[in-house]
Amino acid sequence: MLKPLLPKTVMNKHETIYREAQAQAIAANGAGWLHDTQSEALERFLEQGFPPAKLENWRYTDLSAMAVATPELLGQSASGSAAELPETANHRLLFVNGRFDATGSQIKDLPEGVVLGTLADAEANSELLVADPEAASSLRALNTALLNDAAIIHIPDNTVLDKLVHVVFSNTAGATVFPRLVVMLGKNAHATVIEHHVGSGAAVSNVITDIVCADGAQLSYQKLQEEDGDTYHVAAQTIRLQKDARCDVVNIDLGAKLARNDLRIEFAGSGAEAAANGLFLVDGERHVDNHVHLEHQAPHTGNRVHYAGVISDKARGVFNGMIHVHQAAQKTDAALYNKNVLLTKGAEINTKPELEIYADDVKCAHGSTTGQLDANSLFYLRARGVPELEARNMLVHAFAIEVIQKLASDGLREYVQASVEKRLSGSNG
């Protein structure tokens, strides 16, 4: 058995803090049907601790600083004000420091049967909240143990939600939060969901997203992370697709001191399809780690995955992608690619695309490329009077635009482009 990340004596010292935090969460959430699950999850986390770098999936990401910061912040009170959000024509669920903020939320004219709610609305759809198997990661167990609220989205059969749903998790300095997003689409349902993380100070954010798409459902799911540069952000998304369901995923990381995303897509029904596009910009001494696991369990399933990384200064990026084709998943058509550009000599990327195939009639491809900006293109722009910094930023923007264009709305694309340009203006050196 692997040793926990922190010594047992340290974990024992922190145990009282975690138990007090759970008591507060249980008192706040009022979900009596969930409390036994929460108690079991805390015992599992206290036994396992944070995942150590000796685990293959964590060999490039060291959580020791986060393991120390989490109990320290749990004993403090968050301060500062939440992010200001503009008026929107879309639906919005706002959570500030892990708790639902009705004042900043906007929900109007929902079709019959649609649920856009919180933990108070979850008992009737509790399967994904109480399902926390022992094989699940210790980080998921910690999220369950200290959960005090959740965003619940349920679209019933044959329902099309025209307006997108913007779920905002806003954190302030000193916050330790455990956001949970649950999305359930019924048969032939259609929806667009944006999961957005913002922050105004150092925090710890441990996020779990669970998505189930029933037969024929179609979901556009997009995650944007732009938390404070002193925040630890670890997140796991599990997407289960039934027969002929489709999910289009966009995952963009622009913030946090350390960010980790674990995206798992399960193709459980024949004809299920997914596309996943990711963009991570990493500067300073920041660290961003993306793991993508594609489980093809049924025949005639397909995916297209493209992640792009831009790394500068002394920052570090990590990408690991796995296409796993089960024996029953004949006629799978899958492709996974990671492309990276290093802007400075001190920048680093560890990339590892993988295939694991047990079916004999499939079409699968994977690959990775890493390089610098094209010198000829840079010279071409400089020769036409474009300043060097602007020329570099133009080339990086051209590299990133393929992912940005996958975003669901014009407003979101413009917002992300402005954020990318702002970050690039200070990340070249």
Image: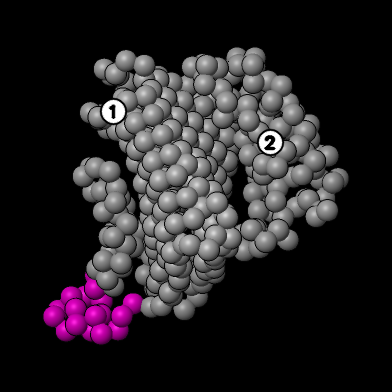
32 or 191: which is nearer to us?
191
Query: Are dots 2 and 1 in contact, CB under 8 Å?
Result: no
Q: Does the magenta segment cover residue 230?
A: no
The amino acid beneath tag 1 is Val
Tell me how far mark 2 sits from mark 1, CA to CA.
32 Å
Where does residue 139 sit, x and y in percent of width and height?
A: 65, 42
263 or 83: which is nearer to us?
263
Where does residue 50 sit, x and y in percent of width and height?
A: 70, 47
Q: Which mark is residue 133?
A: 2
Q: Examine the residues drawn in magenta and state their main secondary structure.
A: helix
The amino acid beneath tag 2 is Pro
The residue identified by callout 1 is 160
What residue lies at 49% left-to-right and 55% top-to-bottom?
Answer: 330
Decide if residue 318 is in sight here.
Answer: no
User: SS at mark 1?
Assistant: loop
Q: Quadrant of the C terminus?
A: bottom left
- Residue at far right of view: 9
Does residue 381 appear to the left or right of 94 in the view shown? left
- Residue at far left of view: 384
* Dot 2 or dot 1, earlier in sequence: 2
State the image quarter where residue 186 is shown: top left
